[in-house]
Structures are given as structure tokens and as C-alpha cells.
Amino acid sequence: MDANLEFIDCPTCGPSEQGPLYDVDGWKIVRCLSCGLAMVNPRRQSAIKIYEDDAYFSDNRFYYDYAGNKRAYQIGFRSKLALLKEFCPYGGTLLDVGAAYGFFMEEAARFGFQAFGVELSKAAAERAAAHGVVFNRALGDVETDQRFDVVAFIDSLEHFEQPLEGLQKAHALLKDDGIVAVMVPNIDSRFARLMGAKWHLFLPEEHLFYFNRDSLGTMLARSGFDVVHMGTGGYGRSVSEILRVLTRGKSVHLRPIETFLRKMAFEVNLGDLFAIGRKRTSSGDAAGIERRDELSPPLNSPREP
Ligand SMILES: [Zn+2]
């Protein structure tokens, strides 16, 4: 095997049986048969290095033009913040993990939160700092006495090499009763199942994990949260970006009318997941175990013939 590749256990379950799902661009997507979490396995070691490079936010393979699509992204952020506000009516401090250029932080401030961010790219962190304090490092390396009312992972947890550790760190950084918000692609959405291996959110070099309701709920419970909301959420997308995804990057020749196509933006809900968990402060994993019992078996668990 390539020396740069590593095999991983399920971050939630540890050593468990894994079953094959898809081959995507030469990468194997497998599913933990215990909790349902899908992952790239084996995967490249130290995959998260790409986010330290500012080209991530302008490279055609990744975001293409993050800044140009700001308005579209913020449309998607608004509905998440409106829901967060129901659980956190007085606002408070919010830490955005994977802050990019600070667009979510900016929107959070409009909703009455005092925004903080964590961002790996130095150039992006500098831009995000216009909207609050930004830690330019990995979440695991954040050291602060500040405690937060909300820690948000909007399109970032699926990029983590160790997502359980990310949620545990969020737990440690939250005030008692604080909440965690997680938006991730849903591998079991109708749309994802319809698209199969061609699902546009299969990005094996960036998205290392693929959640469904069960696996996200289980990981949240395991990291010390009671799930108080598990629903679907949309992404804010401009017509220009939708065309780019549909044509797999070949719509670049539309540049002359790009400005116009970017202004046409709306929220697209393809069944991806938005979950909210409340920090559990009592000891023990009782709530997590209870919740697991309610969960349906994972899609790919072995079935009776
Ligand atoms: Zn598992």
C-alpha cells in the first residue's frame, strides 16, 4: 500500500466491521456497520493540510470563488441562525469552526451573537478577523479561557481527520448548557442515494466522513451532547455555482454573465443534515445509549437473505 495512506477505525466505535459502499475517483468509501458512519478508507495521511493554503477558497476544484458567492452562502446561514436563536434566544458567544472568510460570523453578529472563529488558513483568518476574534489554528490547538454559548460546525465536521475529537473539544469549550450546531452532507438523503457514486458531495480528498441521521446522532451523544434537533438544512447557492457543480467545473465560459448569475441566489435543500446538541454535564453516557436504541439500523448493515 502507498506509504502516504492510512487505514482508520470508525472514530465513534473504534475497531468495528466496515462494509464497502462506493469507489469514487479511486478512493474507497466504506461504512461502519455498527453506527452507520461512512468514511474514506484508506485515506491520505494529513489530508487537512490543503485548508492552510488560501488557494482552497479560489481553486476550481474546491470552492472556485468563495468570496464571489458570499451573498448566496449567507442566505443558507440565515436559516441555521434563525433556528439556533430558538435554542439560544439571548444570543451570547458563538465560535464558528472553519470560519473561512468570516461570512457566517458576520451573519451571526447580525443575529445578536458575539462571533469568534477558528480557521486554518492564515489569509482567510485575517479576513474573518473583521468580524471577531479568530484563532488561526486547528480546533484541537485552541487554548482560551473564553467559554461559548454556541460552537458551530457549518460544513466543517466532514473535513475533520478526527471528528469525534472535534466535538469533544467543542464540548470542553462550551458553557454549561451550551449548544453545538452541525451542518454536514447526508449520505442517506434521497438525492445522495439517487446520485450514487456521482453525488456531488463525494469529495474524498476533502470530505473524509459522510454522516446520516443515525451516525451523526450517535457521534454527538458519544461526545457528550443530547440531540435536541435533527433535521435537514439547505445550502445557499447561486445559479452560477449550481451550474458549475452540474457541469463539473466546465461552466467557466459563462464568466461574462457570472456577476448576474451570482446575484440569483436561493437556499437549496437536498436533505443534508442540520443538528443541534445541548451539552450534557452530568457524568455517564446514559442519554447516548438510550438514543442509540431508538435509531434504525444503518442502511448497509447485513440483512437477512
Ligand atoms: Zn461506527
Image (tube, rainbow, N blue to C red):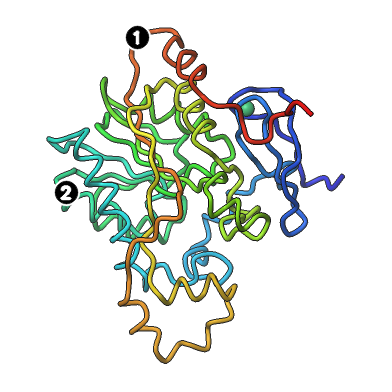
* Rendered position, 63 above or below 158: below
Helix, strand or loop at label 2? It is loop
Residue 26: horizontal and vertical position, in percent? 77, 56
Residue 54: horizontal and vertical position, in percent? 48, 63
* Amino acid under disc 1: Ser
- Residue beneath the point at 49% across and 13% down: 289
**Residue receiving disc 1:** 282
Residue 191: horizontal and vertical position, in percent? 53, 55
Q: Marks 2 and 1, Cα distance to the nearest angstrom?
A: 30 Å
* Rendered position, 83 above or below 77: above
Residue 48: horizontal and vertical position, in percent? 58, 49
- Residue beneath the point at 70% across and 45% down: 29
Helix, strand or loop at label 1? It is loop
Q: Is residue 106 left or right of residue 302?
A: left
* Rendered position, 241 above or below 300: below
Q: Earlier in the sequence, mark 2 or mark 1?
A: 2
* Amino acid under disc 2: Phe
Dot 1 alpha-carbon crowd within 10 angstroms: few under 14, some 14 to 19, many 20 or more: few
Q: Quadrant of residue 10?
A: top right
- Residue beneath the point at 25% across and 47% down: 81
Choose between 191 and 85: the one closer to the eye. 191
